[in-house]
Amino acid sequence: MARKLTLDFLKTEAASGSALALAAIAAVLVANSPWSADYFTWLKSYHVLQIGPIRLEETISDWIKEGLMAIFFLVVGLEIKYEIVRGELSDPRKLATPVLAALGGMAGPAAVYLLLSATMGAPHAGWPIPLATDIAFALAIFGFVGKGLPSSLRVFLLTLAIVDDLGAIALIAVLFSEGANWTPLFWALGALAVGAVAAHRIRIPAPFWVLGFALVWYLTVLSGLSTSLTAVAFAMIVPIKGRAEDRQSPLKEAMHDLHPWNAFLVLPLFAFAKAGVSFAGLSMDQAFAPLVIAIALGLFFGKQIGVMGAAWLASALKIGARPTGASWLQVYGVSLLCGVGFTMSLFIGVLAFPGAVDSPEQVEVKLGVIGGSILSAIAAALVLGFAGRRRQTDPVALQPEVEPLGPKSGQKLT
């Protein structure tokens, strides 16, 4: 069951990569078309949501960032919980290598960015931008070039990306949630506590889960905090086990229902809103500005150095192990793939440099993220494609992986 759910996740997220790519391309085309002014005006236009006494007024850009992206983080939180309880993350031996690789994949880009910040003068506030990995794009590229590669690499990439996203969410909460209004925040925490207790005592129908999430989201917006953290916190209270009378898992039901919306609406709409870069009046100085270079090289060099270095170190120290049936060349290809930081990096860029979507900082953030992600995607596709063809022509690699006959090390015969 765990394997089936993981494969379903991979298929859905991989398929959404095409929608993401089309949305990003459309954003760039529109931003450089005669409709460019209308595009940016639409993103900055204010819209009101009012239900009785409840009233919120935000720009389209903010509705997407704090509203729809909360659904994305809810889905990520559900995946994290499932993997911890039932999936790959439930086995410490399988968990160690991707977790350490994810930590290395955050430390490497931060180090590269801060080094370039000190030498080139890139804004210090941008260092968290190249730390994230885009799950959907990474899995989509892996799906295109991963034929002939061991399935363990897919699980390794998924686990690494989930832990990476968890770290990015924690950074968002710590770095970009200042000036909180504590009263609605305490109410939100109270609602989460009540929901957690109720979920273990009674069967909560799906509409009440929707209302509960909406309440926690609304209180978080009032508190001034990023909705990402409370979305993940809400996912943690969703039960993974169904009641005896229906045997339906609320968590799996929510994942099944939300994945298509998240993959084919939320993320593509976010890409369309955030990837629009106008090249009108763009000078070479801005195209190669310190912020652009620091983000791009942080994603391209920092990610591969951090992920590959941490994975190799975990194996050398016997803390973890290489994915089953995978070569170090294939692991290196995955480490390159982790440099595709599109959605999450753009999201962090919006938080790190708040302002208009067409401000100079936002333009440079987009150029850096897009440039670094494209470099990483091309390099990863070449390495993984070569590694896949090499494995297919290797007779040893084509042999099925079987458990050795006889007792395992340290196991006595009975």
Image (cartoon, rainbow, N blue to C red):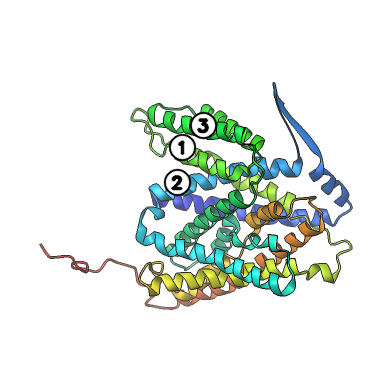
Upstream in sequence: badge 3 or badge 2 = 2
Numbered badge on residue 190: 3
The CA distance from mark 3 to mark 2 is 21 Å
User: Left or right of 391: which side holds 384?
Assistant: right
At label 1, the amino acid type is Val
The residue drawn where x is 36% and y is 58% is: 92
Q: Amino acid at mark 2?
A: Lys
* Residue picked out by circle 1: 238
Bin the neighbour count of mark 1 within 10 Å (Cα to Cα): few under 14, some 14-19, many 20 and up: many
Q: Nearer the viewer, residue 17 or 221?
A: 221
Circles 2 and 1, Cβ within 8 Å, touching? The answer is yes
Look at 65% across and 65% down and name the residue there: 373
Q: Considering only order in the chain, which callout, 3 or 1, is on the residue closer to the N terminus?
A: 3
Return the x and y of residue 245 as percentages of the image width and height: 35, 27
Q: CA distance from mark 2 to mark 1?
A: 9 Å
Give the vertical position of 271 relative to 386 (above or below).
Answer: above
